Image (cartoon, grey):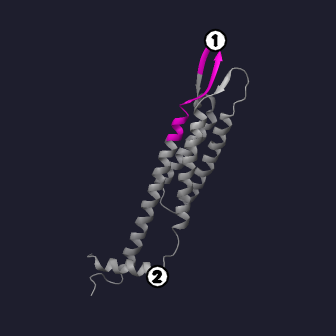
């Protein structure tokens, strides 16, 4: 006979599923936050090189692309909101916002890397590195969205039976 009453089993099963979903959500949010921070670091790299009055000048991404810096800041705040929010519709909306922002950053970094020859200006390494890090940020956000979409499936009866028997074997 089991030491676990039948009335408590569904409650424990639901709590275990909720804990698993929250842990998965937090893991993806942390990965996205790390990618966002690395993407923000690329704005501190040189994005353009120019010669002015005989001097060589490196301009940072924040100087040449302040709108991308503002877009990155909004994306960082939305990514931090993912850490605060629990899995659900609000977290999915925040992840969608982050995905749109990363697409905007991707387009801006690509455009910044395509500097036309308007005199003595050459593109620096910043836009190329920003492209790579923004693609990583977009990949983590996409994985987060896909994990949230697929986590609401109904498990098969064999899985439920195994989980119930495992929970019944444990002591309360």
Depth order, front residue of 95/159: 159
The residue drawn where x is 69% and y is 34% is 114
The residue drawn where x is 51% and y is 36% is 41
- As drawn, the residue found furthest toward the top would be 54
- Residue 94: x and y in percent read 56, 54
Secondary structure at badge 1 equals loop
Mark 1 crowdedness (10 Å alpha carbons): few <14, some 14-19, many ≥20: few
User: Is residue 97 found left or right of 157 in the rendered image?
Assistant: right
The question of residue 49 being in magenta is answered with yes
Q: Which residue is mark 1?
A: 54
Q: Which residue is mark 2?
A: 157
Mark 2 crowdedness (10 Å alpha carbons): few <14, some 14-19, many ≥20: few
Q: Reading the chain from its start, which is encountered first: label 2 or label 1?
A: 1
Asked if 135 appears above or below 89 in the picture, the reply is: above
User: Is residue 3 found left or right of 96 in the rendered image?
Assistant: left
Q: Which residues are magenta?
A: 38-57
- Residue 151: x and y in percent read 51, 67
User: Is residue 122 found left or right of 89 in the rendered image?
Assistant: right
- Residue 37: x and y in percent read 49, 41
Secondary structure at badge 2 equals helix
The question of residue 83 being in magenta is answered with no
Depth order, front residue of 126/19: 126
Q: CA distance from mark 2 to mark 1?
A: 75 Å
The residue drawn where x is 52% and y is 49% is 79
Q: What is the quadrant of the C terminus in the image?
A: bottom left
Asked if 20 appears above or below 96 in the picture, the reply is: below
The residue drawn where x is 57% and y is 42% is 132
Q: What is the quadrant of the N terminus in the image?
A: bottom left
Asked if 171 appears above or below 84 in the picture, the reply is: below
Depth order, front residue of 115/84: 115
Q: Are marks 2 and 1 in contact (CB under 8 Å)?
A: no
- Residue 49: x and y in percent read 62, 23
């Amino acid at each position: 006979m089991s030491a676990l009453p039948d009335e408590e089993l569904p409650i424990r099963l639901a709590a275990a599923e909720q804990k698993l979903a929250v842990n998965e959500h937090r893991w993806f949010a942390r990965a996205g936050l790390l990618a966002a921070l690395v993407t923000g670091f690329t704005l501190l790299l040189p994005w353009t090189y120019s010669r002015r009055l005989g001097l060589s000048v490196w301009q940072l991404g924040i100087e040449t692309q302040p709108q991308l810096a503002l877009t990155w800041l909004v994306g960082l705040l939305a990514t931090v909101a993912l850490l605060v929010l629990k899995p659900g519709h609000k977290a999915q909306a925040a992840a969608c916002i982050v995905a749109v922002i990363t697409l905007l950053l991707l387009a801006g970094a690509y455009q910044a890397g395509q500097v036309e020859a308007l005199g003595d200006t050459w593109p620096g390494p910043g836009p190329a590195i920003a492209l790579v890090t923004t693609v990583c940020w977009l990949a983590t956000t996409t994985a987060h969205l896909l994990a949230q979409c697929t986590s609401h499936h109904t498990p098969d009866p064999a899985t439920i039976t195994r989980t119930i028997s495992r929970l019944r074997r444990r002591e309360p």
